[in-house]
Amino acid sequence: MRIQLDGVWKAYGEGPGQFWAIEDARLEVASGDFLAIVGPSGSGKSTLLHLLGCLDAPTHGEVLIDGEPATRKSDRELSLVRRNRIGFIFQQYYLNESMTAWQNVLLPLELGKVRDRRNRATEALGWVGLGSRLGSYPSELSGGEQQRVAIARALANSPEIVLADEPTGSLDSATGGDVLAMLQSLNAERGIGLVIVTHDAKVAACGKARIQVRDGRIT
Amino acid sequence: MTIGGIAIGVATLFALLALSSGIEGALEREISGLGAHILLLPIGCPYTLTLSLMQGADTPEFIPEDVVPHVRETENVRTTVPVVVGKAKVNGELTPIYGTTDDVFRVKSWGTADLTGALVGSYAATKLKLKPGDRITVDLYSEVTVPVTKILDETQGRDDTFVFLPLALAQKVLALEAKLSGILVETENVAKVTQTRYTLAKIAGIQAVPPSEVFDTLVGLFGSVKQTLILITGIAIVVGVLTTMNTMTMAVYERRREIGLLRALGSTRRDVFALFLSESLLVSLAGGVVGLALGYAASFLLPRTSGFGIAASPQFSLAYVGICLLVACAVGTLSAIYPAMMAARTQPIRALREL
């Protein structure tokens, strides 16, 4: 899988209050890559990640998925790309508090009515070391464990590229190190493309490639 | 609260359908229970006079008894049943009495042809604690004492409330000698009822009315009341739609993060739309089921009278259950369309960011 940003601009707001979060971004990421996007807070790195994941649409320019413009794809086609080919990991985990760890991981598999989804959810949680916490609710898990549930959820559909937005941002350094090691092994062992947004230099140093974002521009 | 809002609308509708069906059925049963093809009544409002005849109420107008031979001689008339009704004290209790002749046995199936004493309707017998062989005192303007010859089987109609007496005795008690409240006419050839009616109407001092016409008019009158009730029910249902819409809109706002996450994980707009629509349908169906139970209970608590003085039990049918559940589903669908569209249009990352 290959995702490209081709001269992408992204504006928020309208009229005099409008500001450009991303200006003329050109970027390519493919399966097997490990790209770190660094920059200060508010520089536009998360916006860049959301554009790569088709969670947001550019104001100008094109997002190309395997060479095909995303604008030519229907909502259903883009949803299927997100469901089957891209995994998302967020800084705030975004777990459903009323569901157990296992149910949270099962959710994207249920959306796609994936075969053998119950076993796959169990396997994904086992892979992140939470095989014994299937029935635990997010409130019963530590921050590191919750992020691992979120990683298991992102991996459950066997994505080709995982987009992680500050995956260690809410964790202490030891737990953050564990999570990072887990993501590195995903890239190394499974060949999953990995894009990590971070402002942590140590995390950025793990990437095979690194881009800097400042005031909405890739430098 | 949403389930309650829908339940009230559905309950009102179910009770209305069951009660109005019961009332229409009772009206038809009572009027056909008169056993006549044509009713001869004094000059006056035919509907009031018919109801008075059915209820045993006192009326100010009467037919002179000497018209009976003219009626009997009219072509196509098979049976002529002179009737006088009114309220008198039977063993001290004010009770509707019905004076008639043996001709009544040709239009009523009572399992007896003996009107030498009193025939007592089942409800009146229970109320007055009477059994065959008892003697009753009937008193108003004059007092008479007669034996009870039979307690009639229950008909679930007005006949259950009457004490039937020989015509002359009833006239004496009510001080209506040579006067009649009405005459029931049975024809030989039903196809010629209209012609016979117009011939009878020519007799001075009477009007001839087919009971079917009275029934149609009374059902029409009740229909106007029913339409008003349906309008009120419609308002209750609209309130149910607005309540559900409000709840669903609030749910969409409160669950923006969940919607954003679902969209990020690959839910299509259609999936999100279907999710909220199905939730609304489930809530509405639950409201519909609760409403059916409430409506069933309410139809027994509400007054069982048509307003025409006719007692009517509610009549339930599976069709009414179906109609009410369909209405509940329609409420669920209508009220969910806008909130579900709003949910489906949610921009995933904006929803995740806002929270």
Image: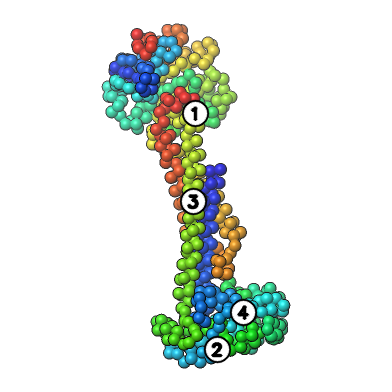
SS category of the residue bearing label 2: helix
Chain identity of mark 1:
A
| Residue A155 visible, this orientation | no
Camera-side mark, 2 or 1: 2
- Which residue: 53% across, 74% down? B48
Camera-side mark, 1 or 4: 4
Chain identity of mark 3:
B
Drawn side of residue B184 relative to residue B137, left or right: left
Q: CA distance from mark 4 to mark 2?
A: 16 Å
Q: Position of residue A219 (x, y in %)?
A: 34, 8
Q: Are marks 1 and 4 on the same chain?
A: no
Q: Contact, CB < 8 Å: mark 3 with mark 2?
A: no
Nearer to me, B143 or B32 = B143
Chain identity of mark 2:
B
| Residue B346 visible, this orientation | yes
Residue occupied by mark 1: A104
Q: Are marks 3 and 4 on the same chain?
A: yes
As drawn, the label of residue A170 is: none
Chain identity of mark 4:
B
Mark toward the start of the polypeptide (3 vs 4): 4
Q: Position of residue B327 (x, y in %)?
A: 46, 51
Q: Which amino acid does the dot numbered 2 rest on?
A: Glu
* Rendered view: B1 above or below B29: above
Q: Which amino acid does the dot numbered 3 rest on?
A: Ile
Residue occupied by mark 2: B65
- Which residue: 44% across, 41% down? B336
Packing grade of label 4 (10 A; few <14, some 14-19, many >=20) is: many
Q: CA distance from mark 2 to mark 1?
A: 90 Å
